[in-house]
Image (cartoon, coloured by chain):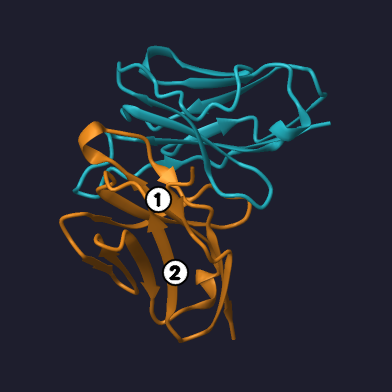
Amino acid sequence: DQQVKQNSPSLSVQEGRISILNCDYTNSMFDYFLWYKKYPAEGPTFLISISSIKDKNEDGRFTVFLNKSAKHLSLHIVPSQPGDSAVYFCAASVYSSASKIIFGSGTRLSIRP
Amino acid sequence: GAGVSQSPSNKVTEKGKDVELRCDPISGHTALYWYRQSLGQGLEFLIYFQGNSAPDKSGLPSDRFSAERTGGSVSTLTIQRTQQEDSAVYLCASSPTAVQFSGISEAFFGQGTRLTVV
């Protein structure tokens, strides 16, 4: 049972344009969401997070949007840069029960010149 | 070092042998996670330690897998009688507390241990 789903395994975006990565979740108990970025041969690194009390969180070029009714979140990167090419993982957790973080399967983002 | 440290970085073992993977979390972090990433797959949750609470072992794929965390710090993931399907990168992460709304308690990952079972 995949509780966090990233249905697009890959995405190619032109440099300077907006990259939009999507994520869906099935567990309505999730109330904290995170995005991680992973380069080859490295561990994932934290990018940005959002709690369920918000619908948007922005940090520089990165913005995460949360639509609780649709159980959907998205990560927007604008403008996209070559260094953004990586695998992006969406993750979720249930804060109130101090539960584990569940990750999606990842989306490989490629920024083309 | 200041980050999560995992050893070894690479391990090749023969099918049927036991292996131990080590994780040194960031000092003071109470939460510790083990995940694995098989080739072309996402991050699969294995086990989660939070302070003195009983670990969440719900992700361990079989009874050949076990993990312990001694003194609330170092953790060892043990795989007995390894199989070829155990080949993956095993990632450890730690966080200061459980994930919090403040966003400062995200999990920090180590570089991983690449396990190859031949």
Q: Residue at the top extreme? A: B71
How many discs appear? 2
Task: Spot the cyan chain and give its letter.
Answer: B
Residue A58, above or below A100: below
The residue pinned by badge 2 equals: A21
Alpha carbons under labels 1 and 2: distance apart: 13 Å
Identify the residue shown where x is 54% and y is 20%: B76
Q: Residues within 10 Å of mark 1 (few under 14, many from 20)?
A: many
Q: Residue at the left extreme? A: A53
Give the amino acid at mark 1: Ala
Q: Residues within 10 Å of mark 2 (few under 14, many from 20)?
A: many
The image quarter containing residue B112 is top right
Residue A16, position in %: x, y? 46, 86
Residue A36, position in %: x, y? 43, 55
- Chain A, chosen colour in render: orange
Residue A56, above or below B29: below
Q: Quadrant of the C terminus of chain A?
A: bottom right
Q: Is residue A78 left or right of residue B88?
A: left
Could you say whether the residue bearing mark 1 is in a helix, strand or loop?
strand
Could you say whether the residue bearing mark 2 is in a helix, strand or loop?
strand
Mark 2 — on which chain does it sit? A
Residue B108, position in %: x, y? 41, 42
Identify the residue shown where x is 30% and y is 21%: B51
Q: Earlier in the sequence, mark 1 or mark 2?
A: 2
Residue A75, above or below B20: below
Q: Which mark is residue A55?
A: none
Residue B96, position in %: x, y? 29, 34
Identify the residue shown where x is 34% and y is 62%: A72
The residue pinned by badge 1 equals: A91
Identify the residue shown where x is 40% and y is 50%: A91
